[in-house]
């Protein structure tokens, strides 16, 4: 979940992870920071475990458009980490030193021990509570079927458990569902009953992230050349609008390439439906009419733009930014004439 | 005895008036009838006045300030204001209210540029750029040629001398240039779209 602190503690340049041609950010602080400081929203694509059947509200990770990734890399705010290559190097090609490996395994074991200890503590508590509850009651008052599953289970366990007390493991227990069965079996089989209170066997932990074992790559130094991610031909207008302070979002729902918001999309309606193209790329006038109509119908401007080619790069329009990459970008807004 | 042929339409007559004398070089011919038809539509369907056509000059323009348009353009005066910037509208309404008036303030019409196109044409950003580079913010006083046979196509020179529409409005001169793009379809439907040369926030009407 996003932190509520006022200033996320992240340090530029930030890592963007490239996986299967997607640019992903996994860290909530980074997501907040990019949105707040760099007007980059991206799209949250992670399913929410609490509500897996819907896709209206999504969680981490954040997917960035190639344009966004490129812009951040060009501004030296972020750098791209090739996740596949990194994993391959570290895990398949023996990129980790033996020491790192040992340290990581120790950390995992510690984690497993903590989990097992926690579970033991909980079941002890439950046992105590149950005994207290049952302590004064007559055993004959218990319903018949309450004891049934217990006897079944006792048979399976081959008499290794004692009979008279209710064992914590025998109480209906949701948690056991989520334990790895092998680990639980191993734990039970190898632990003599009277050693239960001693240190439990650690659970096996299946790591869900690979970034404790992998070290976050060192960001490229200021002088090194970085390969900016490839972006479509509409990149110049994207960059130009971003430099003008607009927030850009994917524009599929309005049939355009981007939607341009004058501020954070949570606070403003978008102003423009943006399509970027090359300076000499031909398009049908019908497309212009369609876009102009749609834009006017939803109270937005239909904006076409691209990098002006040829000549001295006259900086017309509102292009006053000193950024050389968005210089010479020209845009045209189209609205219905009302007649 | 052949039945009498029907009278040619008003548009047909207008085109015929302009057929013999070619005001430009042959290469503007593809746009000539298109331009006249748009001018006709502006005059008679939308009641524009003072319509003038700005033909591309055959040779490089003599003065460096006014470059010749790459294709014919029309300028004219709409019966009422065609475009109001949203911020200008707010300003007008506020000053209007301060003055203790109610209703919608009267706005003076401004001369507009019109770019005639056919829907079958292909278009590029570069062409927009060329057109915008060749025009000023407001069509200049006395520029362009009067269209013969259009009726009140701007013959009243003295009327035009009194007020140069749009030039006094700082909103017009400070905002990016704008052009009205007229797109003609085969069934003689004409649709008009305002094109701004830059980022202009949309109207909220």
Image (spheres, coloured by chain):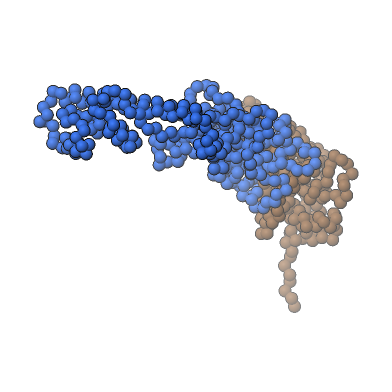
Residue B163 is left or right of residue A20, and the answer is: right
Q: Position of residue A309 (x, y in %)?
A: 75, 43
Furthest toward the top, the residue is A6
Furthest toward the right, the residue is B62
Indicate the quadrant where residue A261 lies. top right
Task: In the rendered view, tell whether residue A294 sits above or below residue B204.
Answer: below
Q: Position of residue A152 (x, y in %)?
A: 19, 39
Task: In the rendered view, tell whether residue A133 sits above or below residue A143.
Answer: above
Q: Residue at x 52, y 32 (%)?
A: A96
Q: Position of residue B101 (x, y in %)?
A: 62, 29
Q: Colour of chain B?
A: brown
Frontmost residue, B150 versus A80 = A80
Q: Colour of chain A?
A: blue
Give the number of callouts.
0
Q: Residue at x 44, y 38 (%)?
A: A47
Indicate the quadrant where residue A241 lies. top right
Q: Is residue A301 visible?
A: no
Task: In the rendered view, tell whether residue A111 sits above or below residue B106.
Answer: above
């Amino acid at each position: 979940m996003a932190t509520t602190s006022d200033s996320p503690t992240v340090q530029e340049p930030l890592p963007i992870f490239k996986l299967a041609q997607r640019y992903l950010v996994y860290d909530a602080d980074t997501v907040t920071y990019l949105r707040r400081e760099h007007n980059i929203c991206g799209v949250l694509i992670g399913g929410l475990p609490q509500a897996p059947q819907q896709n209206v509200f999504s969680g981490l990770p954040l997917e960035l458009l190639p344009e966004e990734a490129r812009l951040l890399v060009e501004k030296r705010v972020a750098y791209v980490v090739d996740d596949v290559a990194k994993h391959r190097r570290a895990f398949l090609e023996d990129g980790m030193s033996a020491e790192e490996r040992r340290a990581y395994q120790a950390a995992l074991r510690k984690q497993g021990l903590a989990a097992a200890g926690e579970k033991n503590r909980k079941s002890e508590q439950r046992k105590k509570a149950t005994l207290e509850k049952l302590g004064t009651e007559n055993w004959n008052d218990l319903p018949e079927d309450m004891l049934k599953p217990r006897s079944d289970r006792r048979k399976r366990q081959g008499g290794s458990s004692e009979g008279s007390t209710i064992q914590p493991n025998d109480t209906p227990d949701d948690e056991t569902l989520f334990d790895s069965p092998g680990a639980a079996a191993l734990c039970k089989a190898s632990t003599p009953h009277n050693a239960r209170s001693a240190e439990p066997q650690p659970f096996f932990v299946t790591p869900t992230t690979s970034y404790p074992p992998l070290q976050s790559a060192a960001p490229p130094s200021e002088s090194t050349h970085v390969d900016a991610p490839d972006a479509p031909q509409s990149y110049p207008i994207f960059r130009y609008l971003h430099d003008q302070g607009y927030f850009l979002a994917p524009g599929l729902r309005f049939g355009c390439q981007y939607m341009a918001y004058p501020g954070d999309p949570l606070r403003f309606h978008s102003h423009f439906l943006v399509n970027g193209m090359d300076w000499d790329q031909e398009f049908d006038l019908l497309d212009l009419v369609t876009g102009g109509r749609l834009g006017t119908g939803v109270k937005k401007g239909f904006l076409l733009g691209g990098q002006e080619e040829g000549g001295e790069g006259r900086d017309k329009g509102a292009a006053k930014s000193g950024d050389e990459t968005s210089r010479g970008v020209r845009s045209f807004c189209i609205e219905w004439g009302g007649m | 005895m052949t039945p009498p042929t029907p009278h040619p339409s008003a548009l047909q007559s207008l085109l015929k008036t302009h057929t013999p004398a070619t005001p430009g070089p042959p290469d503007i011919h593809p746009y000539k009838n298109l331009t006249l038809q748009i001018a006709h539509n502006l005059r008679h369907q939308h009641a524009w006045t003072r319509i003038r056509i700005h033909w591309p000059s055959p040779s490089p323009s003599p003065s460096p300030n006014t470059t010749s348009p790459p294709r014919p353009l029309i300028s004219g005066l709409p019966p009422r204001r065609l475009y109001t910037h949203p911020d200008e509208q707010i300003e007008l309404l506020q000053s209007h209210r301060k003055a203790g008036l109610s209703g919608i303030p009267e706005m003076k019409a401004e001369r507009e540029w019109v770019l005639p196109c056919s829907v079958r044409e292909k278009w590029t950003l570069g062409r927009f750029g060329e057109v915008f580079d060749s025009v000023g913010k407001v069509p200049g006083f006395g520029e362009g040629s009067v269209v013969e046979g259009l009726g009140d196509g701007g013959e009243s020179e003295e009327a035009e001398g009194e007020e140069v529409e749009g030039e006094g409005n700082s909103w017009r001169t400070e905002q990016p240039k704008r052009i009205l793009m007229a797109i003609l379809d085969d069934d003689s439907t004409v649709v008009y779209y305002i094109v701004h040369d830059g980022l202009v926030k949309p109207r909220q009407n």
